[in-house]
Amino acid sequence: MGAVTEPFWEKPLGELSRSEWEALCDGCGKCCLHKLEDDETGHVYPTNVACKLLDRETGRCSNYRGRRAFVPDCIRLTADMVERLDWLPTTCAYRLRAAGQKLPEWHYLICGDPEAVHRAEMSVRGWTIGEADAGDLEFHIVEREL
């Protein structure tokens, strides 16, 4: 009988292939919301304002491959930086796995349903606004935990 292999999402982040890394994203879209940083304290405040490329219905980037041409400061997340980015959502699969935690039951890799993240109300669907319609970000700070 062959050895049982662990699901790829349970491997350490640094061991994931590029396709496994990309597949780990749950499609919540919360990392693509604008944030404001207090210059004096460094505290980061989340907003409900989505990046212009974020499809707020699917929680996915509408131009993922070419996003840096339209949003030059878009971050390409790597395993080395996950633990340093304290603004990543607490439910982010990369953040959870970096901390050695399991993926939540609503993650599509666990339940098999990409819509589960939305039904669990863990995504940007239904409570965000596009940056073209937002105006000043200061008026869009949210109290919710991301």
Image (spheres, rainbow, N blue to C red):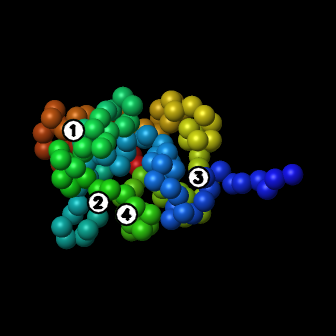
Query: Which residue: 60% across, 59% down?
Result: 11
Task: Identify the residue at image location x=39%, y=66%.
Answer: 81
Q: Position of residue 22 (x, y in %)?
A: 45, 48
Q: Residues within 10 Å of mark 3 (few under 14, many from 20)?
A: many
Q: Dot 4: within a 10 Å radius of its alpha carbon, few (fewer than 14), some, or many (20 or more) residues?
A: few
**Residue 81 in sight here:** yes
Secondary structure beneath label 3: helix
Q: Amino acid at mark 1?
A: Lys
Which amino acid lies under the numbered mark 3 shown in the image of this protein?
Trp
Label 4 close to label 1 by CB (< 8 Å) = no
For marks 2 and 4 on the same chain, the one whose residue lies earlier in the sequence: 2
**Residue 10 x %, y %:** 62, 56
Say which residue label 1 marks. Answer: 52
The three-letter amino acid code for the residue at tag 2 is Val
The circle on residue 85 is: 4
Dot 2 corresponds to which residue? Answer: 44
Image location (x, y in percent) of residue 124 = 37, 37
Q: Which residue is mark 3?
A: 9
In the image, farthest residue toward the left: 135
Between 91 and 61, which is closer to the camera in this rendering? 61
Are the two marked residues, 2 and 1, in contact with CB atoms closer than 8 angstroms?
A: no
Q: Local crowd at mark 2 within 10 Å, few (<14), some, or many (≥20)?
A: few
Upstream in sequence: badge 4 or badge 3: 3
User: What distance separates the C-alpha of mark 2 from that of mark 1?
Assistant: 20 Å
Mark 2 and mark 4: span between their CA atoms? 11 Å
Amino acid at pointer 4: Leu
